Image (cartoon, rainbow, N blue to C red):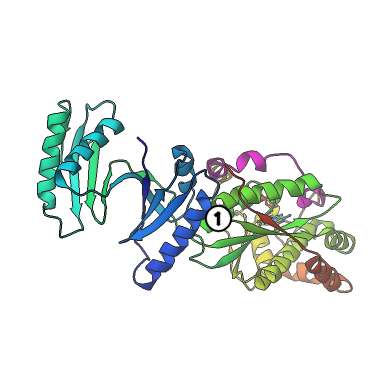
Amino acid sequence: MKYQSFLIKYAEIGTKGKNRYLFEDALIKQVKNALKHVDGSFNYEKEAGRIYVQALTDYDYDEVIEALGRVFGIAWICPVLQVADKDYENLKRTVVDYIREEYTDQNFTFKVDCRRADKKYPVHSEQVNRDLGEVILDEFPETRVDVHNPDVLLKVEIRKLVNIYSRMLPGPGGMPVGTNGKAMLLLSGGIDSPVAGYMIAKRGVKIDAVYFHAPPYTSDRAKQKVIDLAKLVARYSGPIPLHVVNFTDIQLYIYEQCPHEELTIIMRRYMMRIAETIAARNGALALVTGESIGQVASQTVQSLASTNEVCTMPVFRPLIAFDKQEIVDISEKIGTFETSIQPYEDCCTIFVAKHPVIKPNLGIIRRSEKKLAERIEELVQTALDTEEVIWCEADGN
Ligand code: ATP
Ligand code: MG
């Protein structure tokens, strides 16, 4: 069946009063963005707590469903037949045509569920249910009515147009990106941080990202991998400005001045400091990392406390209590896993000590950082001044 429209339902929670139109406008913006890469042209309409996407030209059904399936805030996607002619006899014929085209095998139980939002419509919804039920039973003798647990729930909504639909595909849930401020994601080339970015974007938060690059210790291909990951996350979050910070001189300086077993912790503290500065400059109110308790030496509770100490912004760690396998499952689901496991080194793997501290003592770490006093400010400033910003947008399907 060639539908010309999709009815988009969203969860009502948090969308009362003034919030509703902000929520709807953000949702429409994200839907438009998602359909930008789909062939075809579409019209968007709001009506009474729902959104309609209407195709103005030919389009690819699967592509549209796939694209809408990535828009946070959508609870259900309903391919819908919209009819302008509300004549009752015409409605009966249209419903029969709909069933015939939609279901090749009509051996199912069904229920008609009519909503009459247009109160001027001459037939009451109960009567519509009965009449349409009768017409369907007459036309398709294999069908049976089951009002409690039907195989097919046929919705007939009499509004400005008549909406006829019986399929509801689940959307990703969450809230439309743009309804909950902005956060700065520390994006590395690993499995975890893209998943963390996806999860925070799902709550409606716009994502910018920062990547600490350490050429020549990390290659251009490692950087390209991070760009590729940002583009994959952008399929859900919308375009991501990726701030690439050259971290080499800072890393080398820490390497020269500080005990090697503290290197990772001190390095991570500088990453957090720099990320926070970039976040503040770009209007982000929080940081996001892919950390998970105990995953590696730099993610013990003591290490997390130590890296957290340098930030005043909230640090969101959506994966904090996840097992690796749970994170891998999400990364496979959202399509970042294959890219994440490509074997390009990230800057942490080159400077890791054989025996990093796993329970860093804050006093000792602060004392070690004092050894950086001479040049660190200047190096941080240079890193900030020389950042490169790469606009990462989802590739076309
Ligand atoms: P991931 O799989 O996300 O790379 P990881 O298990 O390798 O994580 P770490 O290397 O300890 O863990 O990094 C923890 C978090 O710190 C990452 O999830 C990411 O948010 C951030 N991070 C680490 N390295 C970088 C980097 N080079 N640039 C930006 N952020 C980074
Ligand atoms: Mg990593």
Q: Is residue 348 magenta?
A: yes
| Quadrant position of the N terminus in the picture | top left
If the image is split into quadrants, where does the C terminus sit? top right
Report the span colored magenta.
Answer: 328-352
Residue picked out by circle 1: 237
Relative image position of residue 388 (x, y in whole percent): 76, 61
* Amino acid at circle 1: Ser
| The one of 193 and 157 positioned closer to us in this rendering | 157
Closest to the observer, 245 or 191: 245
In percent of width and height, residue 7 lies at 35, 50
Determine whether, in the image, residue 187 is placed left or right of residue 323: right
Residue at 46% of width from left, 41% of height from top?
A: 59
Query: Left or right: where does residue 351 sit relative to residue 32?
Result: right
Please state which of residues 15 and 49 is positioned toward the viewer in this rendering: 49
Residue 83 located left or right of residue 348: left
Specify few, some or many for label 1: CA neighbours under 10 Å numbering under 14, 14-19, or 20 or more.
many
| The stretch drawn in magenta includes residue 155 | no
Query: Disc 1 on helix, strand or loop?
Result: helix
Q: Residue 386 in the image: x percent, y percent?
A: 81, 65
Residue drawn at x 69%, y 50% is 227
Decide: is 237 above or below 1. Answer: below
Which residue is found at the position 50% from the left and 66% from the top?
180
Q: Is residue 215 above or below residue 130?
A: below
Q: Position of residue 149 (x, y in %)?
A: 20, 39
Within 8 Å of ligand 1, the CB of disc 1?
no
**Residue at 74% across / 71% down in the picture?**
363
* Predominant SS along the magenta part: helix
